Image (cartoon, coloured by chain):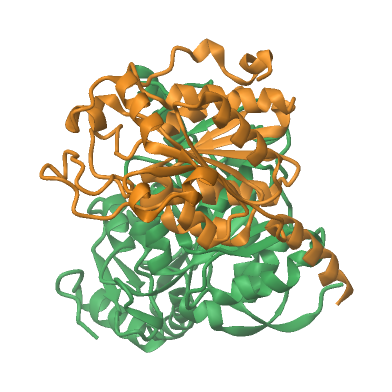
Amino acid sequence: MAKDYRQYLRVAKLPHVWCPGCGHGIITHAIAGAMADLQLDPDELAVLGGIGCSGRASFLFETDAMHTTHGRAVAFATGLKLARPDLRVLLVMGDGDALGIGGNHFIHACRRNIDLTAVIYNNAIYGQTGGQLAPTTPTEKRSTTSPYGNIEHPFDTVRLAVAAGATYVARTTSFDFPEIVRFVRRGIAHKGFSVIEVLTQCPTYYGRLNDLRDPSQMLYEFKLQTIPLEEYNQMSPEERAGKIPIGEFLCEERTEFVESYYSLCQLSRSV
Amino acid sequence: MSKQEFVQGNEACARGALYAGCRFFAGYPITPSSEIMEYLAREMPKVGGVCVQLEDEIASISAVIGAAWGGVKAMTATSGPGFSLMQENIGYAAITETPCVIVDCQRWGPSTGQPTKAAQGDVMQARWGTHGDHPVIVLTASWVREVFEMTVHAFNLAEQYRVPVILLLDEVLAHLRENVTLPAAGELEIVERTEDTEEKMLNFGEGARLMVTGMAHDETGFPAQGEKAAQHLKRIVGKIEERAERLMRYQGFYLDDADYLIISYGITSRAVEAAVERLRAGGIPIGWLDLKILWPFPEKLIREISSQMKYILVPELNLGQLVREVERAAAGQAPIAHLGRVDGSLITPEEICKHVHVGALSGQTRGSAPTS
């Protein structure tokens, strides 16, 4: 990773507001690293976030930045990108933000294949509001609103994004910093809707409520739980139980929305 | 070259938007506003602008705000149910001082109500629909040409003062076709987002590295609390309230010798116009105040004028919304009557004449006014 990543961060605003042991700083650092690797002009970047712990990342990028309303960052970004196709627009969203309240905008952005890069900070819980159930909380895990264990099934972000039509889809965890950098870099470079899900630890709520208080232990759990996609594909259903595949799930070319729109403008003048 | 043509209210709104320089529209289909998006879907690409149908009204207002920060004049159009969904982000536009235009073609409500029936039931929602104290400008129109003019005016005010501007139309005006001559190019003033606007704005992509947030913030755009938050709120609310008199837009008729007054707005003003002529022909000293801006409410004007009146009638297609503001402004100086109709039909000139006869001439006012 390029060393000049700090130019993409509002270093004067550090330290960040996240709890000790939180993984959000790792992801934010990695995004800045990907920007540095690609040597992007900060003035051609825009970073949009929603509400929740992840939304706080939008305050940390030394670019044009917008801290929008809960779940709506994708929709704000859709307007901005259509109005300013020359800008590279990144989304920093939480799991509740992107897949709970903002789920509708998320799937439609996937379907349109609009050229945005969405990094989903997935800590499987609502952290900022105090540890409530998320659409990504694993079954049987506890939150302050599922004190007897979650009876629901969590979203699989990757399968959702692929099914809805995103054209770059990857997953990794806060355990593997270089891999976050690589996937975000690939996502930014990809033309189309890119989804990078990063599983991250919330020791304050998820950990405390689920007997995993030590952040380093949570990170280690990610290492034990995750299996590289190529290896996962070779495993039997029994071996896959309790394991999470990580890697690049999809990288394909398909017509991009903003480009299609401006081609349509040309066409409309000749009709 | 302007020409006489047969134009629908919604089409006039869409054409007014293009005339004002609107180059971004996002919306979601809803009766009775859909023709605005349909017109722009056809015409916007030809001028290189964006018209997109999004997944819902929340996405539409969000995209409008995103586009506005991209430096583009942006608008959405909807009706009651969609307007309700947009409220949170109208507040976001207010606190972030984002210029944008929201058209609400009012229909009978609440909820799904009667999608094809006109109403004026969103007057208070337009002012207070989002949570917290906030600035907003609300305009209205009564005639198809006026829809065009007020759409242009809405963009001008949004750009000049960095505020969301809501244009309240209604089902009948939205679908009404009138024989009109729309303004020619250059006829109406257009405010552009330059250094000359009263509330200056920087856009994304200009190297300013802006921070935009819906949280209470200081002048740098970063979160603030306590006295700084109070200052922030007072400034954004104050910038519109302090300009209330300058923003005032109305037409007054027969006010010099009037003993009785009708205050109306929107579609209802068309019936009032006919009623006033009949009442005047019958020798009744009636005056008429036709409001074009509802918020900020022209409080001073109404306070002054009501001191000269023996009776004021406020007809509107709801159970009593703007009438309360009139009562507040008049502060007991004149008896005030309300004529509210909510059966989905418009108020007629006959009803208005009857109310003035019974109310003004027999002294019956609100609370004792006859029901139609």
Q: Is residue B19 left or right of residue B198?
A: right
Residue furthest to the bottom? B350
Q: Which chain is green?
A: B
The quadrant in which the N terminus of chain A is found is top right
- Taking depth in this image into account, of B200 and B323 the one nearest to the observer is B200
- Residue A86: x and y in percent read 76, 42
Decide if residue B207 is in sight here. Answer: no
Taking the spot 48% from the left edge, 83% from the top edge, the residue there is: B274
In the rendered image, the vertical position of residue A190 relative to residue A263, given as above or below: above
Quick one: which chain is orange?
A
- Residue B303 is left or right of residue B10, and the answer is left
Residue A80 screen position, x and y as percent:
63, 46
Instruction: Name the residue furthest left.
Output: A148
- Asked if A104 appears above or below B239 in the picture, the reply is below
Task: Give x and y (percent) for residue B200.
Answer: 64, 32
Residue B261 visible in the current orientation = yes
- In the visual, does B14 lie left or right of B229? right
Decide which of B127, B146 is in the foreground and name it. B127
**Residue, x 30% and y 22% (percent of image)?**
A217
